[in-house]
Image (spheres, helix red, strand yellow):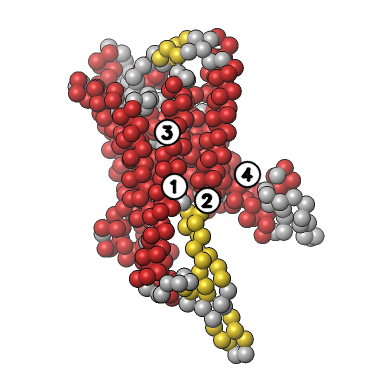
Amino acid sequence: MFEAFRNMFKIPDLRKRVLFTLGIIVILQLGYHISVPLVNRFELEKLMSRPGGLAGQGTLLGLLDMFSGGAFNKFSIFAMGIMPYISASIILQLLTVVIPFLEELQKKGEEGRKKINQYTRYLTVVITFLQSFMLTYWIVNQGAAMGVRLVENPVLFRPLAAFSMTTGTLVVMWLGERVTERGIGNGISLIIFANIVARLPDAVGILITRLMLGEGEVGGSIFRDVTWTTTFIIAVLMVAVVASIVVLTQAQRRIPIKRGRQVVGRRTYGGQMSYLPIRINIAGVIPVIFASSLLQFPATIAQFANSEFLDSMSRMLSPGHWLYEIFYILGIIFFCYFYTAIVFNPKDVAENLQKYGSTVPGFSHGRKTEEYIDQITTRVTLFGAIFLAVIAVMPELVMNYMKIPYAISGFLGGTSMIIVVGVALDTIKAIENHLLLRNYDGFRKKGRMKARSG
């Protein structure tokens, strides 16, 4: 593996891509510390981090803060992060199922994808500006209610802050696309990966502090001593979660297919056996994000409205409560099937097999093949959905039982770990493809191939 890392910098093109990607990540991390104009950053951080604060545990904005690497708590120009772009992408992807015009664009290949990407950018601007403008109203109202001067000149602050955060999101989106084009791996995914990993030093620092000081209070929550036993359990849990995510990401069900024979002159081509891989987790981390966002919606609304009913709903639908965990598991399973049905169409797969003269042994072309592929997809999706729900829920249950601070449990939670490990695997695979293309060893091979001379 270390040899593969060394070889990575021997290839000029790959070295440029890796260094370009790292440079963009550094620029973004610096930008996360630039606050929007006319805001009292120190008073705002106190408001954000107070017990039950806006970006605390169990709220949508707490999830946004995690994906933005803490930029939301700082009210940075990058506070909205890349989430509006992801939301716009998901909305456009869902609309392609119900709007024939978008469905036709999707089938037009590269030209259609460019047009859909353009619509996604427009929708990102609208979503970001609306969300940021609503947030500025909340900040001003909270400052007035608490008697704290959070902003200077509220009338000018609202449009200026909304414009700054919208521009910041567009910059993040543009840099992510540049990483995809000129860097290594998927730029948008790598930005989220870097933002989550950026919280690791804080999590480790709090863990060490609690290990040295013993029982105490963080964020208004009393927790037990963080002992060496607790630390060992956290380490074992983290290794188990990472291993489980690797299995979930790589696992697939292979459907055998037979290629049709073609006679060209005196030679016969085709007739070999191959397979059609179907991943057990086609939807990736999308079901976890959808389910958690939906359940955290009442807690977020409760931050803006003074309602006893919403407060009680917020308490019941907060991480650690049995009702939340049940709905969380059911939501993950539902969205696994829902998103898989959108991105994977057995009818299209069956038509493509027929188009290229391939067949599934024992099944005729057309409807029989489609039904068989749909049956297999339904079964593996159920297994993948349950596996994904266990990975997402178990770390939270264990952390809550041990009273681990949210600054630690939030980083080691199922959602963040699934994203981190999944993106890391995809990036390593992209680097490995560059290495193998130039006859270098990959990360999983050692000493079998030599670099080409010259």
Per the image, label 4 sits on a secondary structure element best described as helix
Residue position for label 1: 384
**Screen quadrant of the C terminus:** bottom right
Q: Residue at x 44, y 21 (%)?
A: 401
The amino acid type of the residue labelled 3 equals Val
Q: Residue at x 54, y 25 (%)?
A: 234
The amino acid type of the residue labelled 2 equals Ala
Q: Is residue 367 left or right of residue 209?
A: left
Q: Quarter-wise, where is residue 451 in the image? A: bottom right
Question: Residue lying furthest bottom in this view?
Answer: 265
The amino acid type of the residue labelled 1 equals Gly
Comparing 228 with 99, the one in front is 228
Per the image, label 2 sits on a secondary structure element best described as loop
Comparing 427 with 32, the one in front is 427
Q: Earlier in the sequence, mark 3 or mark 2?
A: 2
Pointer 4: residues within 10 angstroms few (<14), some, or many (20+)? some
Question: Residue lying furthest front in this view?
Answer: 362
